[in-house]
Structures are given as C-alpha cells and as structure tokens.
Amino acid sequence: MLENKVHKHLNVNTISSGTVATIFGCTGPALIIIGGAASGGLTHVQTISWLFAVYFFSGLLGIYLSMKYRQPISGAHSIAGAVLVTGALTHFSFNEVIGAFLVANIIVFLLGLTGLIEKVMKWIPLPIVMGMIVGVMIRFATEMVTSVTLSPLIAGSAIVAFLLSSRFIKKIPPVLTALIVALFIALITKEFQLGNVQSTFVLPQLVMPSFSLDAIVSISIPLALLIVGTENAQATGVLMAQGYKPPINAMTISGAIVGSIAAFFGGHAINIAGPMTAICSSDETGPKETRYAASAVNGVLFATFGLLAALVVPFVVAMPKVIIVSIAGLAMLGVLLTSLKNAFSNNKFQMGAFFALIIGMSGVKFFNISAPFWAIIGSLAVSFLIEKDHFTVKGKEKAEEPVEKKEKVERLEPKMEASS
C-alpha cells in the first residue's frame, strides 16, 4: 500500500522539483568541499570519501524522513560547516577532525533527545522565523537577477521560459521548463567545459577517529550550533511557512544518528536542507500532500551521487554556474512570497520580523556561526525590547493565525457591521 501511494505521487511535478533540488545541492556545495579538501591537504581518496559520506547518507536521511512523515524533508550537509572544517584541516589531523564530527553529532543528538529544540522553535514567534527565512534565502532571487548580466542568453532565457510556462503551460512545472531551456542553450553555445572530463571510480575510505580537546572546542561546538541553529532552523521555518508541522525532534535525532555513521567516512554534518526543502515544498511541486515525493526523489538522487561521486564530480565542475544560480532563484520564488506574507501580514512582531529579515540578508557571521542563528537571536532581542507585550499568549496566537483565516475574517467584518 505504501509503494502504491509513492508511485501515485511520483509525477512530473514532484520528479522535476526533486531533480532541481539535487542539481542545486550537488553543484555549488560539492565544489566547496572539493576546494576545501584541496586547501586542507586531503588526498583524492579522502576527498571522494568526504563527498560520498555527506551525499549518500544525507540522501538516506531525506528518503527516510520524507516517507515516514509524508512531508518534503530533504537531507543535506551544512555548507557553512564545510567552510568551518576547511579552516580546521590546516590545524588538526584528519583523524582528529573525524573525532570532532562525532562529538558534534552527540551534542545534536542530546539536544534532540531532550526535546529542547522543539520547545525553542515553538516558542519563537512565527513572523520572526518567516523574516529569517526571507532574509537568508532572498539572495537566491537577487543572484538570479544578477546572473542575467553574466550570461543574458542562458539566464534570460531561463527566466522568460519560466514566466511563459507559468502562464501558458499548466501541466509542466515552470522550473522544469526553465531548466530544459537553460541546458539546451548552454549545450548549443558550448558553455559546458567537457573537454577535460576524466572519471575513475574510487571506493570510500573508512577513517578511525581520534579525540583532541582543542579540535572539539574549535569544531564540535560551532558545528553543532550550525546544524541546530542554522541548517535545521531554516528547514523548519520553510516547512512551517508552507503549512506543515515538522517533526523537529525526529529531524534532529535522525540527522545526528546518520551523521555519526557518516563521520567515519569523513562526513562533517548531516542535517535537514533549508534551500532544497524549500524547492521540494514549493507550490510548483503540486498538492501539499504529494510534495514529500519530491524530497524522496531528491534523496535517491543524492544517495546515487554519493555512490558515484568520483565519476560524476567532473561533469558537475563542467556545468555553467549561471544555470545553477538562475534555476535555484526561480525555484525559491514561491517560498519567498509565502514567507513574506506570513512575516508581515499581521501587526504583531513586525519590528522583530524586520530585523530578522535584515540580519539574515546581511550574511553576518560571529564565532563561525552564520546569519540564520544571529537573525533569530537579534530579532528576539529587538522584540523583547520594544514589542514585549506581543509575547503574551493572546498576542502570539494572533500573530501565528494563518493568513488565509485572517483574510476570511477581514472579508466578513464589513458584512457584520452592515447587518448591525
């Protein structure tokens, strides 16, 4: 019965969204790991093992969570965490880094097991979470626009194809149409750098950890904060914006367990993907109850990419960056519009939501912890200072009232006044 439901929900919309999410996750983020491994002095085998770990196991996590909870929950690795690890590789041995990864996952596991993460996320006002989502993810939309200046033909054609498809072709997701057009133009204009592609299969390498207090302080603690306060928080906010009730504790615990296994192969973090969850949960994916299939597709493709990393990475390197940027921006539009509406459609927590937006947009980074975490912390401080009365139970309930319900009430009010 379960298989029949999955097959029924596998359609052009869910498959295309899952594919777009995979292209996004397997291009830029993979290149960050490749560059970081090179600067950190890792061997080719260690680099491929690192890629295998983060993609194969995050793919399994996405498949498990999306199928179990019927929500578009995609697994991934922390991009900010990869940057953090890159700097640490010059100070610690690879075995010490692996040990720090394990400790980070233990910290995350304990936070999920206590239920603390879910309690905190439920306490944070919805407008602030939505403001953070817009601030962090608005760059995808702005980079989509600037990509037109870099390659007017490819990026411009993708945007035009998206708009025309949205207007005239109802049965095909506009993001898929835009992707096909962009790839076709890149091929005929010879923008793919395929001349130097060479692929050889490499087996993942099992690495035994060693533990160093300095490595734990430098890597484990900030990495755990990144997973919980940045990556999982983004995904949770995205799911909430789309009307889901995400299983926060289960996402945290499952990610930590899978991440602990991935660590032995060099995986720095396994968590819930913010941008890819946003792509799979967007309105373009189809009816709300079918969107989980997009994350399942994303998970299968991620796991396959991890298994074949040594063979596939050269082709990823050959893909024009402008395609990735423009398609990712188009895929984010629906989530951004919904989040903006939920952040600023009510008069509660407006200053907090605005500060969450601008701090998220700033990309500020302190103590190796990136903007999403500080957007939440900073905006809460602002709201406590000037919107303290909004934190009452009545005030929070009004702020978190669904947009559709509020609009319905507003339409009824004039009629009620007229009848009186």
Image (cartoon, rainbow, N blue to C red):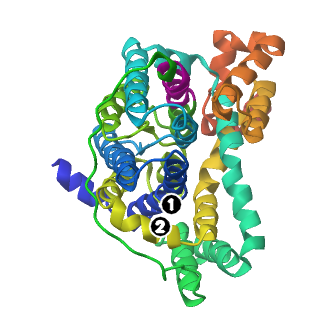
In depth, the one of 376 and 311 nearer the eye is 311
- The x, y position of residue 27, in whole percent, is 51, 60
Q: Which residue is mark 2?
A: 316
Residue 417 appears anywhere in the view: no
Position above or below: 384 against 414:
above
Quadrant position of the C terminus in the picture: top right
- Residue at image location 63% in from the left, 29% down from the top: 369
**Residue 397 sits in which quadrant?**
top right
View extreme (right): residue: 386
Q: Which residue is mark 1?
A: 27
Horizontal relation, residue 272 to residue 311: left or right: right
In depth, the one of 222 and 249 nearer the eye is 222
- Residue at image location 47% in from the left, 78% down from the top: 196
The stretch of residues the image draws in magenta is 216-229
Q: State whether the magenta stretch is mostly helix, strand or loop.
A: helix
Q: How many marks?
A: 2
Position above or below: 1 against 330:
above
In depth, the one of 301 and 242 nearer the eye is 301
